[in-house]
Image (cartoon, helix red, strand yellow):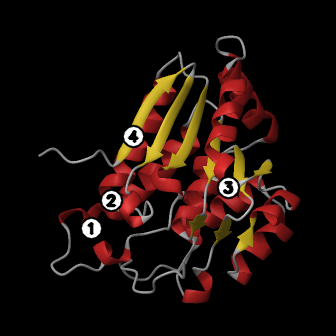
């Protein structure tokens, strides 16, 4: 029996949908899922017919962070030794994505999952959904969250998200400028897809030129930001998380 793909990838009307597909684990990530996410984003970037990406999660949730059961399994999974490279590869693909990324934040985006949401260009969030970066309060580094927060947002926004570790609801995310739009929980996917389709309806190549121009005009270097955050975070041993985020 064939297994379900870890990431569902499809293209329609100029929109590439990259859907995390572990709904039984609220799309908690494992190394192979990160590899599949990177592959989907790279495929979208290389496809000139794609004008926007919709990044979302299956089963009504965006991403609950790392799958701690899998990361701490005994014996360790074969992919554990390269999971750090897999995570870096996923963020590299997010940083290099040639078209705007619309994030559909359903239910929650937690810790590592929050970093994938923050990497998007435009976010649509459910009215009862929330984002949480609790890693610092757990004594864990949060280099990817720091990279995307400091790339896109003010010191005040970064401080609230990073230092408090609190659940930040959809309305607050919009007020802070993190989210573009708050909609009913049932409408997040539809509204996100409609927004991605609106972006993709621009003349061919427009979104690619616009995204490249915005990065150049702002002097944005996403890969440089990510690498700087990774090298300045005090990581002294192999990361094997042991503290589960509260859901």
Choose mark 3 or mark 2, whichever is in front: 3
The vertical placement of 59 against 140, above or below, is above
**Which of pointers 3 and 2 lies earlier in the amino acid sequence?**
2
Q: Are marks 2 and 1 in contact (CB under 8 Å)?
A: yes
- Distance from disc 4 to disc 3, alpha carbons, whole Å, reads 21 Å
Q: Are marks 4 and 3 in contact (CB under 8 Å)?
A: no
Q: Residue at x 71, y 48 (%)?
A: 124
Instruction: Categorize mark 2 by other alpha carbons within 10 Å: few (<14), some (14-19), many (20+).
Output: many
Percent across and percent down for residue 148 are: 66, 57
Q: Residue furthest front?
A: 186
Name the image quarter holding the C terminus: bottom right
* Nearer to me, 162 or 195: 195
> In which quadrant of the rendered view does residue 167 lie?
bottom right
Instruction: Categorize mark 4 by other alpha carbons within 10 Å: few (<14), some (14-19), many (20+).
Output: some
The vertical placement of 128 against 94, above or below, is below
Q: Residue at x 30, y 54 (%)?
A: 32
Choose mark 4 or mark 3, whichever is in front: 3
Q: Are marks 4 and 1 in contact (CB under 8 Å)?
A: no
Q: Which residue is mark 3?
A: 185
Q: Secondary structure at mark 4?
A: strand
Percent across and percent down for residue 147 are: 64, 60
Q: Which mark is residue 31?
A: 2
- Distance from disc 1 to disc 3, alpha carbons, whole Å, reads 34 Å
Q: Secondary structure at mark 1?
A: helix
Q: Which residue is mark 1?
A: 80
Seen in the image, is 180 located left or right of residue 126? right
**Which of pointers 4 and 3 lies earlier in the amino acid sequence?**
4
- Distance from disc 2 to disc 1, alpha carbons, whole Å, reads 7 Å
Seen in the image, is 89 located left or right of residue 15? left
């Amino acid at each position: 029996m064939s297994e379900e793909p870890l990431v569902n990838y499809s293209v329609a009307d100029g929109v590439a949908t990259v859907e995390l597909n572990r709904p039984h684990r609220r799309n908690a990530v494992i190394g192979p899922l990160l590899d599949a996410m990177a592959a989907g984003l790279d495929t979208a970037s290389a496809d000139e017919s794609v004008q926007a990406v919709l990044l979302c999660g299956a089963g009504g949730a965006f991403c609950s962070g790392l799958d701690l059961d899998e990361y701490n399994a005994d014996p360790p999974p074969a992919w554990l030794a390269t999971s750090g490279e897999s995570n870096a590869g996923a963020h590299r693909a997010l940083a290099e994505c040639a078209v705007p990324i619309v994030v559909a934040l359903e239910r929650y985006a937690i810790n590592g999952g929050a970093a994938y949401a923050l990497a998007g260009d435009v976010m649509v969030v459910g009215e009862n959904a929330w984002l949480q970066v609790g890693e610092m309060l757990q004594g864990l580094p949060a280099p990817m969250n720091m990279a995307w927060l400091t790339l896109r947002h003010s010191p005040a926004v970064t401080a609230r998200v990073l230092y408090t570790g609190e659940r930040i609801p959809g309305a607050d995310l919009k007020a802070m400028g993190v989210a573009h739009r708050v909609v009913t929980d049932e409408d997040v996917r539809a509204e996100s897809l409609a927004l991605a389709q609106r972006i993709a309806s621009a003349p061919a190549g427009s979104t690619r030129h616009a995204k490249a121009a915005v990065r150049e005009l702002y002097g944005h270097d996403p890969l440089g930001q990510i690498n700087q955050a990774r090298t300045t975070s005090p990581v002294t041993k192999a990361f094997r998380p042991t503290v589960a985020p509260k859901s």
